[in-house]
Amino acid sequence: AKLVEDAAHAHSSYLDGVGWAGTIGDIAAFSFFPTKVMTMGEGGMITTSSESLHQACREIKNFGCDLSGGSSRFVCARGDGTNGRVPELSALLGLLECRRVRERVARRQVLVAEYVKGLAGCPAFEVLQQPGGSCSCYKCIVRLRGIDREALRSFAKARGVAFTGEVYHLG
């Protein structure tokens, strides 16, 4: 059995006592979708320390071609192949993003700290935070206590505030 790590939002994150995002599972997947912490417009990246998983991923992303030194790179050895290669312009954007991602994460961390500070002592809200390490703060997750979610959304909307990226209802 292999552990697949979902690191889609975890660019430059680590958890104390566990490790850096992308190094915890046997293989990990990061997303570069436009709404993520780091983007290339689309696509993603895998990380692994397993040579066999690395080789399989290289073959899959290149139409399933046998890359192990066969007589032709056009020999398809896998039925699960696809065109997963990154276009040059996207790769250039990714290289530029590498220079900015830590600054972007630091800014997100400052904003979440402001929410924590601003909501301190308010029994109706709890900002959920990673217990230790460094979080990319892709989302600022706030748990509501005793407040109807739809009523809060309507209240905010009437004042020109929109909730973006809302995903989970924790009950």
Image (cartoon, grey):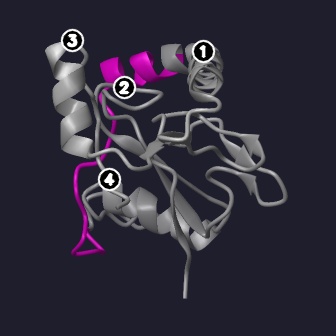
**Residue nearest the viewer, comparing 70 with 126:** 126
User: At label 3, which amino acid type do we have?
Assistant: Arg
Residue 58 x, y percent position in the rendering? 43, 57
Q: Return the mark for residue 154.
A: none
**Residue nearest the viewer, comparing 47 with 103:** 103
User: At label 4, which amino acid type do we have?
Assistant: Tyr
35 versus 99 height, above or below: below
Residue 106 x, y percent position in the rendering? 65, 19
Residue 146 x, y percent position in the rendering? 39, 50
Q: Return the mark for residue 107.
A: 1
Counting residues from the start of the chain, the first of labels 1 and 4 encountered is: 1
Disc 1 secondary structure class: helix
Say which of marks 2 and 1 sits in front. 1
Say which of marks 2 and 3 sits in front. 3
Q: Which residue is mark 3?
A: 159
Magenta span covers which residues?
76-95
**Residue nearest the viewer, comparing 51 with 101:** 101
User: At label 2, which amino acid type do we have?
Assistant: Met
Residue 28: in magenta span: no
Residue 89: in magenta span: yes
Q: Return the mark for residue 168.
A: 4
Q: Residue at x 33, y 62 (%)?
A: 60
Counting residues from the start of the chain, the first of labels 2 and 1 encountered is: 2
Q: Which residue is mark 2?
A: 40
